[in-house]
Image (spheres, rainbow, N blue to C red):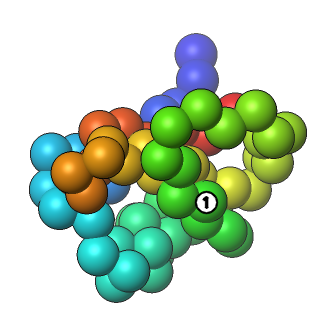
Amino acid sequence: MTTDILAPARHVIGSRYVESVNAYVLELTGLATVRVVTGADLRDFKHDQVRIDVDEEGFITGLRNC
């Protein structure tokens, strides 16, 4: 069984993205870095990173960790 480390931060999905969300998500998840993604991002995932997906209108559409 795996633990969803992003679960405590999933409530931000649907909210408007502002820079302070980065620190908030890191605090809730315990991960080390954030990458904000708008569109396709084919770079490698890092195990200690959370990706915040943001749509063209500036709303958070998802959170991902490898």
Quadrant of the frame with the N terminus: top right
Name the amino acid type tagged 1: Arg
Q: How many marks?
A: 1
For the question of whether residue 9 can be seen, the reply is yes
Q: Which residue is mark 1?
A: 35
In this rendered view, identify the residue nearer to me: 44 or 7.
44
* Residue 8 seen in the current view: no
Say whether residue 62 is left or right of residue 39. Answer: left
Q: Position of residue 60 (x, y in %)?
A: 28, 49
Front in this rendered view, residue 34 or 29: 34
Compared to 27, does 55 lie above or below?
Answer: above
Which quadrant would the C terminus be assigned to in this image?
top right
Classify 25 as above or below 13: below
In this picture, residue 51 sits left or right of residue 22: right
Quarter location, residue 58: bottom left
Q: Given the current orientation, which residue lies at the most extreme top position?
A: 1
Horizontal side of 64 relative to 55 (left or right) equals right
The percent position of residue 9, horizontal first and vertical second, equals 32, 54
In the foreground, 61 or 7: 61
Q: Residue 12 falls in which quadrant of the image?
A: bottom left
Whether 56 is drawn above or below 29: the answer is above
Q: Residue furthest front?
A: 56
Secondary element under disc 1, as helix, strand or loop, is strand
Residue under the point 36% across and 48% down: 54
Disc 1 crowd, CA 10 A, few/some/many (<14, 14-19, 20+):
some
Residue 49 appears left or right of 26: right
Q: Residue at x 48, y 47 (%)?
A: 38
Residue drawn at the location 32% of the way across and 43% of the way down: 55
Horizontal and vertical percent for residue 6? 44, 45
The residue under the point 74% across, 56% down is 48
